[in-house]
Image (spheres, rainbow, N blue to C red):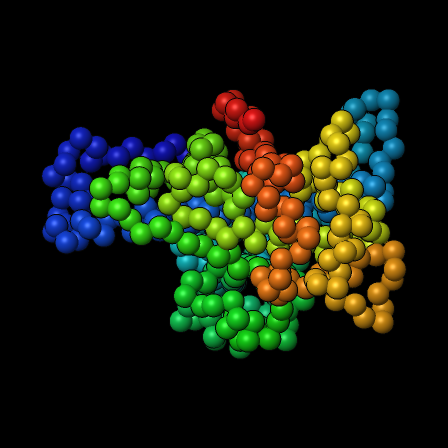
Amino acid sequence: MAAVEDVTANLPSLQFEAALTLDEKQMLYLRGRSHALTVSACAQAAFLVAVLNDARQKIVEIKYPVKKKSSKLLQEAPKRDPLLVGIIGCGRLGKQLASTLLKFSDVHPEELFLSTRQPETLSALQMKGVHCGFDNIKVCSTVHILFICCLPSQFPTVAKEIKGHLKCPVYVLVGGTPLLRIRQLLEYEEIIKPDFSWRKPDPNEDSSNNWNIGKDINEILREDPNSCDVTCPLNLNKDSAIVETGEDWAELAVVTFLNMCTEKELDMEQSVRLCNTIVFGMGPTDDRGDGISVDELNSDINLLGIRNSTTVEKFFPRFDLSKISFGRSKFGKRLMEPNGSLRRMFVKRYRAVFDKFQYWKGVPTNVS
């Protein structure tokens, strides 16, 4: 669908700001902040889902290689082991998140499960084949990763209903609720919650108004590389960022990836190799020493690992997401190094998720 033109352009008396008092105009920066928050939340979720989906497909290809035929027309399509994604709460953020995942994360409509009190408002998504209803418990028991996008006032009710049914990473996009409180309400530890922050606006600075709030979020990620870049938590150029995300998010993403590899019965070497390839974008010509290693992760097991009687030595134990924020691991410290190779590769790979779409559309990417 073509973008809708702003009919109020060059007509100041018809624009949103025209009816505002001077005091109200002081609050205009909140519009840009809200839009930037949504873009950041959706972009980061899209990256995580994209790399998890990519990994599952690579694992299928490793375990069940397709025999090559002499003719491409006779070539069998590779099997698909999709990441099933659930979203609880489909207001403005939930709907936008669903749209972004369908656009950038290789999520097919039939692999997306939405639960909302008003499923009748999701007719456009239903027509595409997305599962829409109002059954939070069913969504929890079906998916491989769950996003919670409800209002803060609704979260205690949602948590009471779904606790005890959670078995996958839970990605919480609920404002105004601390992580510790979320863990208490859900009685669950495998939680990812981006830590967003922003600077106090300077009345003499116009940076908050430079964010194009009239632009569709998918359009920004598809066509505006600079705005896309600032959503990456490890991006070093934070001067143009209205909203920043805690750098711990990158470590949480990597650990979630490694936990999935262990669930798919990949040993330590296989998990690290796949992580270096998919999360950090390493190719055959890159220096292996730039990526993560088994020894490096094993040195963090006492800090982050959950060992039990069923842990097999050749596999990593499950990494405890709740410990990421309490103590910086050796791997985490290296990932956060301002000029480190690991950080540089992560940022480049993050950008590549959206660059791939831009490349198909002929948009210049200029990745350095």
From the top left corner, tell me how far across and down residue 224 is, in percent.
44, 32
Q: Quadrant of the N terminus?
A: top left
Residue found at x 31% / y 39%: 207
**Viewer-proximal residue among 86 and 274:** 274
Residue found at x 80% / y 50%: 295
From the top left corner, tell me how far across and down residue 180 is, in percent.
53, 71
From the top left corner, tell me how far across and down residue 350 is, in percent.
58, 39
Q: Quadrant of the C terminus?
A: top right
- The image quarter in which residue 344 lies: top right
From the top left corner, tell me how far across and down residue 215 is, in percent.
36, 38
Residue 263 in view, yes or no? no
Residue 14 in view, yes or no? yes
User: In this image, 7 relative to 170: left or right?
Assistant: left
Residue found at x 71% / y 34%: 282
**Viewer-proximal residue among 21 and 131:** 21
**Viewer-proximal residue among 354 and 230:** 230
User: In this image, 269 relative to 26: left or right?
Assistant: right
Residue found at x 20% / y 36%: 8
- The image quarter in which residue 153 lies: bottom left
- The image quarter in which residue 135 lies: bottom right
User: In this image, 220 relative to 144: left or right?
Assistant: left
